[in-house]
Amino acid sequence: MNRDVVIGRILPGLARPVAAVAISLAAFALVLRLSGYDVAQVYATLLRGAVGDPAAIASTLRWATSLIFAGLAVALPLRAGLFNVGVEGQLYLAGLVAALIGLRVDLPALALQPLVIVAAAIVGALWALIPTLLLIHTRASEIVTTLMLNYVAIGVADYLVNNYFRARMSAEAVMTDRVPPAARFPSLVPPYPVSYGLIIAVALALLLHLFLKRTKQGYETRMVGLNREFAAYGGVRIGRSWLVAMLASGAIAGLIGAFETNGVNGRFVSQFSPGFGFDGFLIAFLAGGSPLGVIVAGLGVAALRAGSLSVSIEFGMPRITIAIMQGIIILLISAQLGRLDFVRRVVRAFRLRSVIGPSMQVVRHEHDSQS
Amino acid sequence: MDERQLTPEAASDGGAELDMRGITKRFGDVVANRQVDFVVRRGEVHALVGENGAGKSTLMRIAAGIMRPDEGGIRVSGETRSFASARDAAAAGIGMVHQHFSLVPSLTIAENIFLAEPPNQFGVLDPKLLRRRAAELSTRYRLDLPTDGKVGNQPVGVQQRVEILKALLTGRKILILDEPTAVLTPQEADHLFATLRALRASGHTIILITHKLREVFAVADRITVMRDGRAFPPVAAAESNPSELARMMVGRDVLLRRPNATQATPGPEALRLDAVSCRNDRGATALDAVSLTLHAGEILGIAGVNGNGQDELVEVVAGLRQPSQGRIVVVGRDVTTARSPRARRAAGIAHIPTDRMRRGVALPATVAENLMLGPHERPPLSRGPWLQSNAVRAFADTLIDRFGIRTPSAAAPVAALSGGNVQKVVVARELTGEVTVLLAANPTRGVDIGAAEFIHRQLEEARARGAGVLLVSSELDEVRALSDRILVMAGGRFAGPFAPDVSEHELGVYMGGGDRAMLGSEAGAQHDGAA
Ligand SMILES: Nc1ncnc2c1ncn2[C@@H]1O[C@H](COP(=O)(O)OP(=O)(O)OP(=O)(O)O)[C@@H](O)[C@H]1O
Ligand SMILES: [Mg+2]
């Protein structure tokens, strides 16, 4: 508590996420320096790779599409006090279904593309439904179940593709054939892979903002997230709030799959997600769980990713080093927002993630009934 | 921090143990303390009183190093001090028991006591030593704590004593207690005061915040009244009296003892329990086949020492705890199987919970959001799936006004309110709308005398509108002043009913009396054996 007060005094209000990013940029500079890089040059390349020219901007927007979706998919359950650590699996299965519909269903683009989007959303939602039902009826921690279902989803999808839908031409890569043009989301700015998914992502953020602020269900969802015992005592149907948040979250995750597969890649490619589900946590954190904040944070992390691609090409630096910086941001943000119940649970989730390993443990929900 | 020059008078006040001068503390537009001078003499019990939101907790948090003042200076035993943290204040010998518990429920009492600095051997935690030291301390200060028990399993009275013991470890010189008796029965409070007197005799200086004037005159040597962020010069307890004090606090005359304003007109049955049993969180029997009938237009008081099944009784009726046997009937309808709080609310049950911080409010949410839970489902606060923000604001402003909730606005987070004002938020929400059965558990806990009077009147008005009110209170005065009938709860069973003019002594006997009454946990434990 005391430490929060102190940090709260140093970094009041909105300055926090900004400060976290600034501090991590500085800390990362130190890492670069110690590894013998020219810090100024690296950062200049990073900036150029993110916004330096039209191609760089397009690259940032390309990543922003999926990252905004991912941030929303994590932020919404957070507001209900839940962790969807299963965005990876949800988007993966949805991506496969999007590709298969594109490959097998013969419809004009105007009908096919909405079908792909809706189907992918449904698949993502259904995959999120399983852990949610387990949570509601058996109190099995969604942190564990969503995480575990990632491995199931990825295994199942790869198995199916490898055995039944593998591209005829591919020798080593596990992927499907290209989807036909009717199923392919067109680029807004050819030749760059920026589709209208970006517009949907931003619109969705606005809708979720309205949902949380202006609807009964949104209000109830927030109360469940802020103090579950208060909500239950006041007559809120906790299970319903959880279902709504998790189904919507899974559906949004599904959209990532649809737009990556039928948009950017044009086909289902094994391991196509570079960890969107976990980037989603970083973004949702930076945004403080706010959907509007997710737009900003999503763009920021997208710029970082686009820039880091340039850096890794130009300096031969492994891209994992950028992950160090993201890790620093996560640490700072969670330390600062540690007083919020949901962030406390995020931190616990990450701690869990590192200890679960091969031995599966079922973790019960504890009541955070302190102070 | 602005270190104001201390005045010569202050310096010459040789007996001052704690000397706070010109303290100002602002929260945004709210001035919680304005130019407060507060002087406590060595070896006295000093009462700090005033209305909800007057700034008492803020002033004491500054003294305990938890907050920094915007202006002003602090001297401890004549030495100028500047506290950057509670640790600094502890180093100066100041310890504080907060208005709301800060215990870790999953740890034992012993572990909680030594949380900050566990006794160790060469840096290695020594659990045996820890347990022995905790037991020694408990005995030394006559607090009778089951030090090996988990804190989460203890009744509030015991948790309160754990907090006191924790504060005693840091408060070697000055012990600050912020409304320590709000959760205690009069017997438990008397027990606490005996402890405080013993501490004073051994040289401690004690500052006590309370809303109960009885306690002020029972234990305090001098009194400082705060109003609206300012402090009056202290008065000697021997030279003052309750009504004068009340007038200073509120700024007008207050009726301290009031005859029943409205008469009870008991109507048909509102709530009936038939041989209801349930277990507590530890799995022991909490309610032992209790039956009661509450009529519409009646206030039924439940008196008893904390931890004798009152909490479970309220929770069972509210749908927050499932009975193991028995029936619950609301206005002739069996609701036993309508298990959720939602279903019970639909049946017309409203509930002021005993622990406001746990489920009474969502602290980070705004005052409006805390007030609207429930009514938000219906017009005018919502239409279809949409909330009507204008209606919500108007609704919140009306309640804030009617219940005198001191808050900068309806959009302020409840976390920024003073303790008594948080309680008013809960009471306002639960007393609004159609109520068939009102479960009021310690409804005036932590509110000032003016607000307590107001809440009492509201309970009587609810009765006049035909609600059946189940008033569960650890305060006998409150139970006797408001109830039409009284049941005493001890060991998960009822004794009575008694008429409201029953003597305090007689109730005390039925509540268990003597030592047992002072040991909420023991009462429960003994009952387990008997069950
Ligand atoms: N952290 C905070 N942020 C904003 N305002 C605050 C904060 N803490 C206290 N206040 C405001 O300062 C004023 C004084 O609060 P304080 O808690 O000191 O009152 P109090 O005298 O202890 O009241 P009570 O008897 O209800 O406990 C109140 O108006 C309260 O709303
Ligand atoms: Mg207070």
Image: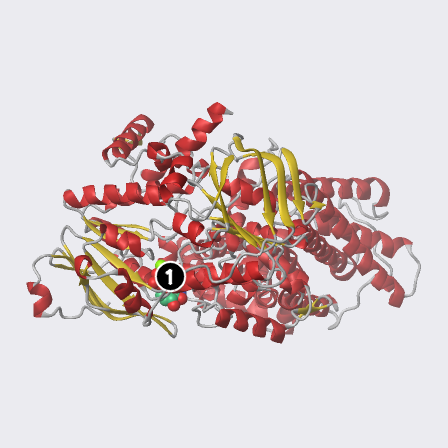
Q: Give x and y (percent) for residue B517.
A: 37, 36
Q: Give x and y (percent) for residue B216.
A: 26, 54
Q: For the residue labelled by badge 1, is the local secondary structure a helix, a strand or a loop?
A: loop
Tell me which residue sits at (14%, 45%) in the image. Answer: B203
Neighbours of disc 1 within 10 Å: few (<14), some (14-19), many (20+): many
Q: Is residue A355 left or right of residue B326?
A: left
Q: Give x and y (percent) for residue A90.
A: 72, 49
Q: Amino acid at mark 1?
A: Asp
- Seen in the picture, residue B514 relative to A313 is either above or below; the reply is above
Per the image, the residue denoted by label 1 is: B448
Residue A37 appears in the rendering: no
Quadrant (top left, top right, bottom left, bottom right) of the N terminus of chain B: bottom left
Disc 1 CB within 8 Å of nearest ligand 1 atom: yes
Residue A203 appears in the rendering: yes
Q: Chain of mark 1?
A: B
Q: Give x and y (percent) for residue B168.
A: 25, 43
Residue farthest top in this picture: B529
